[in-house]
Image (cartoon, rainbow, N blue to C red):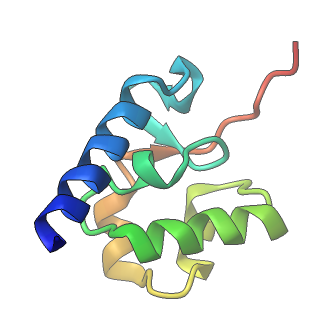
Amino acid sequence: MKTLKKVVLYSVLMLSVMFVPAYGFAAGKINLNTAGVAELTQLSGIGEKTAQKIVEYRTQHKFKSVDELANVKGIGEKSLAKLRDQVTVEEVKKK
């Protein structure tokens, strides 16, 4: 039963990544202001719980710089240094 849950979870994650709009990935980087949990878990050192904390932080405080990632519980200076080249903060253009 545990294996079936894992298979379903991984399948859902993979499908969600396949159907993510392109604006979630700017120049090969993940946009902190648009990425969901599935995209954020693609970052090195970011698991599902930390990805959820990033999304929760974003609902309260829109990211204005990558440095603000250090304000998310569980992300320290070392983690921020590793993530800096993998993420971006861009405005979401309204249509």
Q: Whole-percent x and y of residue 77?
A: 40, 81
Tell me: 53 left or right of 11: right
Tell me: 51 left or right of 68: left
Whether residue 24 appears in this view of the structure is: yes
Q: Whole-percent x and y of residue 45?
A: 26, 69
Pick out the residue farthest to the left. 3
Q: Residue at x 12, y 65 (%)?
A: 3
Report the front residue among 69 and 14.
14
Pick out the residue farthest to the top. 95
Report the front residue among 46 and 6.
6
Tell me: 24 left or right of 58: left
In the rendered image of this protein, does residue 70 appear above or below residue 73? above
Q: Whole-percent x and y of residue 36?
A: 55, 48
In the rendered image, which quarter contains the C terminus? top right
Pick out the residue farthest to the right. 95
Report which quarter residue 24 is drawn in: top right
Q: Residue at x 87, y 21 (%)?
A: 94
In the rendered image, which quarter contains the N terminus? bottom left
In the rendered image of this protein, does residue 25 appear above or below residue 57? above
Report which quarter residue 92 is drawn in: top right
In the rendered image of this protein, does residue 55 appear above or below residue 72? above
Whether residue 61 appears in this view of the structure is: no
Q: Whole-percent x and y of residue 47?
A: 33, 69
Q: Residue at x 56, y 57 (%)?
A: 66
Q: Residue at x 83, y 69 (%)?
A: 60
Q: How many marks?
A: 0
